[in-house]
Amino acid sequence: MAPLTFSEPPIFDKWAEAVKNGDFSVDPVLDALGFIPGRFMKYGLRLASSPIYISPYLSLLNNAYDKDYVDRWRRFNKWTNEQVGFSGAAIKQLASEIGKKNKFKATFQ
C-alpha cells in the first residue's frame, strides 16, 4: 500500500472531490503564476499533513538514542523543509496523475 493515497484525501475532502469531478480547477491560478515557489509547496505539504505535523518530532525524541534513525530523520526533514518550486505545468500534471487518477495507489499496491 502506498504511504499516501488520494482515494480518501487527508483533509479538504470536499475540495478534493470537486477537483476529481472537474467542478473546481486551480488551472487559472497556475496559468497566471506560471511557477509555484518552494515555500508554497512546503506549506501545502504541511496543510495536507497538519493533523500529524508534530508526530515526526515526537518520533525523533523517542528514537534520539539511535544514530541511524536520527541521521535518516534529519535527511528527510531537510528534504521536506527545502522544497523546490514547480512549474505550473508540473503541478497540473501532478494534480491530474495523483489527485484525480490516484496513480500512487495503482503503483504501490
Image: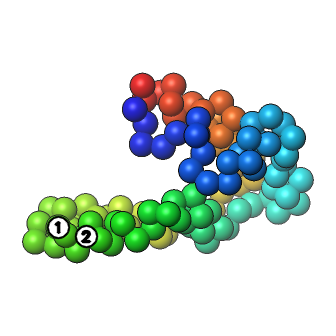
Residue 87 in picture, x, y percent from top left: 71, 54
- Res 97 → quadrant: top right
Residue topped by disc 1: 63
2 and 1 marks in contact (CB < 8 Å): yes
Q: Is any atom of residue 26 visible in this view?
A: yes
Helix, strand, or loop for circle 1? loop
- How far across and how far down the image is residue 39, in percent? 61, 71
Residue at 29% from the left image edge and 71% from the top image edge:
58
Q: Quadrant of the C terminus?
A: top left
Query: Where is residue 64 drawn, in percent x and y?
Result: 16, 73
| Residue 95 in the image: above or below residue 75 | above
Question: Residue 84 — which label?
Answer: none
Report crowding for label 1: few under 14, some 14 to 19, many 20 or more residues within 10 A (C-alpha): some
Mark 2, secondary structure of its residue:
helix
Q: Is residue 12 left or right of residue 6?
A: right
Q: Amino acid at mark 1?
A: Asn
| 9 versus 81 height, above or below | above
Quadrant of residue 1 in the image? top left
Which mark is drawn over residue 60?
2
> Residue at horizontal 52%, vertical 34%?
104
